[in-house]
Every structure is written in structure tokens, then in C-alpha cells.
Image (spheres, rainbow, N blue to C red):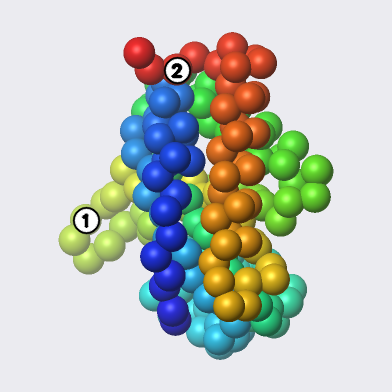
């Protein structure tokens, strides 16, 4: 699996400005070599399995950007999650190939119970037409960040000082 460096710091910062947001991490992957059999391996647990099963793996000239975030276990965290949920759905309705998914680890491991401690959320963004340069991905992230900023201002979403 190939990971690409990409500057997504502005989008990170925008997400982290939301009250109730704890952390944001991201990565970019080439999904083209991924097939159904690989999805059962733990190294691929973070991938959107249902989407990849529908397409029988990654598509040609498509990259996958994933933003993993964690919220506070508070009313502010739930408000941030609800806002991001709406934002992602609205972006998908507008034609972007984007989705929001919960992510967690097994309730118990040989090392003990972890239920209640591993819940995170993934914003999955698929960008096609990536051939010789990552500029289509950069452009999409800039567009997404601008839209998120606008929505935060329009709806007066609570942000950190």
C-alpha cells in the first residue's frame, strides 16, 4: 500500500477549532492495489470495507484521504459530531465522494477490556483523476476546508477561543 505525503494541515486546524474536538489525524492512500481478500487483514481495518467490497477493491487513479477524529465525551463533543455529520452528508449530497463512519476496536483483548475507550470517527474522501500529481487531492481539500469554514460561520458553530 502506498502512502502519499499531502498537506492537510488547514483542514486539520479547522476541525480542531470545533469545541468538543479532541484530535484529528489523517493519511492518504492509493487503494488501487487493495482487493477483497486483503480487507480481512488487521492492517486494513481502518478502510471503508463496504465501499471497497462494492467496487471489488480500489479504483484506478483514485486516492483515499481519511481524517480520523476523536470527540470529547460531552455535550460539546456531541454537538461537534452532529455538525460534522451534517456537513459530510451535505457534501455527499452535493456530489463529493465523502462519507463519515464510526470506528472502534474489539470490546476485549488478551490485555483487558477496552470497550468505551476506542471510539473514533473517520471522514473518508475519495478523489479520482489522480494520475501524475496530487494536485486534484490538494484542490479538493482546499475546497472542503473553505466550505467547512463557511458553514461554521453561517451556522455560528461553537469554536475554541
- Percent of width and height locating residue 68: 44, 49
115 relative to 132, above or below: above
Q: Where is the N terminus found, in terms of image quarters? A: bottom left
Question: Given this view, does label 2 or label 1 mark the residue nearer the observer?
Answer: 2
> For residue 111, what is the image quadrant?
bottom left
Can you identify the residue that label 1 sits on?
A: 112
Q: As drawn, is 111 to the left or to the right of 17?
A: left
Q: Is residue 102 left or right of residue 22?
A: right
Q: Position of residue 79 (x, y in %)?
A: 53, 21
Q: Residue at x 42, y 73 (%)?
A: 3
- The residue wearing badge 2 is 159
Question: Distance of mark 2 from mark 1, alpha carbons?
Answer: 36 Å
The local secondary structure at tag 2 comes to loop
The answer to which of marks 2 and 1 sits earlier in the sequence is 1
Residue at 37 percent across and 49 percent down: it is 25
Q: Is residue 36 left or right of residue 66?
A: right
Above or below, 98 against 76 in this view is below
Residue density around tag 2, few if under 14, some if 14–19, many if 20 or more, within 10 Å: some
Q: Residue at x 61, y 52 (%)?
A: 139
Residue 58, visible in the rendered structure: no
Nearer-the-camera pick, 51 or 66: 66
Q: Are marks 2 and 1 in contact (CB under 8 Å)?
A: no
Q: Which mark is residue 19?
A: none
Q: Which structural element holds mark 1?
A: strand
Identified at 39% across, 65% down, the residue is 5
Amino acid at each position: 500500500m502506498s502512502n502519499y505525503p499531502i498537506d492537510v494541515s488547514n483542514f486539520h486546524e479547522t476541525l480542531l477549532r470545533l469545541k468538543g474536538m479532541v484530535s484529528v489525524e489523517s493519511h492518504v492512500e492509493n487503494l488501487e492495489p487493495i482487493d477483497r481478500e486483503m480487507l480481512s487483514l488487521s492492517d486494513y481495518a481502518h478502510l471503508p470495507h463496504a465501499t471497497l467490497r462494492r467496487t471489488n477493491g480500489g479504483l484506478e487513479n483514485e486516492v483515499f484521504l481519511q481524517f480520523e477524529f476523536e470527540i470529547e465525551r460531552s455535550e460539546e463533543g456531541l454537538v461537534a459530531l452532529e455538525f460534522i455529520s451534517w456537513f459530510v452528508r451535505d457534501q455527499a449530497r452535493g456530489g463529493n465522494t465523502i462519507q463519515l463512519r464510526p470506528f472502534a476496536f474489539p470490546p476485549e483483548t488478551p490485555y483487558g477490556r477496552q470497550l468505551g475507550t476506542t471510539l473514533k470517527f473517520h471522514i473518508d474522501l475519495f478523489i479520482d483523476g489522480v494520475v501524475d500529481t496530487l494536485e486534484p487531492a490538494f484542490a479538493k481539500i482546499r475546497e472542503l476546508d473553505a466550505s467547512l469554514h463557511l458553514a461554521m460561520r453561517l451556522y455560528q458553530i461553537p469554536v475554541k477561543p
